[in-house]
């Protein structure tokens, strides 16, 4: 579908995708396809807010190593710290988690924690 554009109204990455299209780099932006899929299927991603538990703003479950390749020429210093100690509290999710729209606003009917 060469004329299909995976734009999601209200999602900032849709604007970035149009910029990528105009510069001939759209094929490098896989994330817009993930966002479009999630939007069409009314799915949500889980975001880990470990700072609540650890007190560290730079604590992560995963780290983008920014390896040299398609998007990075050389690997800069790591900007996040990978979590090194696991506590069962980290997996305690509310029965009804907060849901946010593409602009970061709470979806009506969603609990605000």
Image: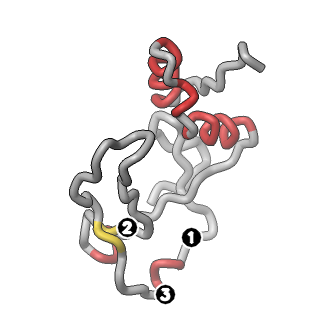
Question: Dot 3 corresponds to which residue?
Answer: 88
Q: Assess disc 3: are there few (<14), some (14-19) or many (≥20) residues with their C-alpha within 10 Å of its C-alpha.
A: few
| Residue drawn 60% across the image and 27% down it | 8
* Residue furthest left as drawn: 77
Residue 60: image tag:
2
Q: Earlier in the sequence, mark 1 or mark 2?
A: 2
Q: Assess disc 2: are there few (<14), some (14-19) or many (≥20) residues with their C-alpha within 10 Å of its C-alpha.
A: some
Quarter of the figure with the N terminus: top right
User: Compared with residue 35, is residue 17 higher up or lower down, i.e. above or below?
Assistant: above
| Residue drawn 36% across the image and 76% down it | 83
State how far apart marks 1 and 3 are (Cα): 14 Å
Which colour assignment does the render follow? secondary structure
Tag 2 secondary structure: strand
95 or 12: nearer the viewer: 12
User: Compared with residue 9, is residue 73 higher up or lower down, i.e. above or below?
Assistant: below
User: Compared with residue 85, is residue 105 higher up or lower down, i.e. above or below?
Assistant: above
Q: Earlier in the sequence, mark 1 or mark 3?
A: 3
33 or 96: nearer the viewer: 33
Percent of width and height locating residue 27: 57, 29
Based on the displayed image, in which of its 4 quarters is residue 23 positioned?
A: top left
State how far apart marks 1 and 2 are (Cα): 20 Å
Q: Assess disc 1: are there few (<14), some (14-19) or many (≥20) residues with their C-alpha within 10 Å of its C-alpha.
A: few
Question: Dot 1 corresponds to which residue?
Answer: 94
Say left or right for 4 vs 80. right
Residue 74: image tag:
none
Tag 3 secondary structure: helix
Percent of width and height locating residue 61: 43, 69
| Residue drawn 37% across the image and 86% down it | 85
């Amino acid at each position: 579908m060469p004329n299909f554009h995976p734009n999601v109204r209200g999602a900032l990455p849709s604007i970035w995708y149009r910029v990528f299209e105009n510069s001939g780099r759209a094929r490098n932006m896989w994330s817009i396809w993930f966002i479009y899929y999630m939007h069409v299927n009314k799915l949500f991603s889980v975001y880990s807010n470990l700072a609540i538990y650890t007190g560290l703003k730079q604590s992560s479950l995963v780290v983008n190593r920014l390896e040299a390749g398609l998007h990075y020429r050389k690997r800069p210093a790591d900007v996040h710290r990978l979590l090194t100690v696991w506590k069962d509290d980290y997996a305690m999710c509310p029965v009804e988690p907060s849901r946010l729209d593409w602009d970061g606003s709470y979806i009506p009917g969603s609990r605000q924690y």
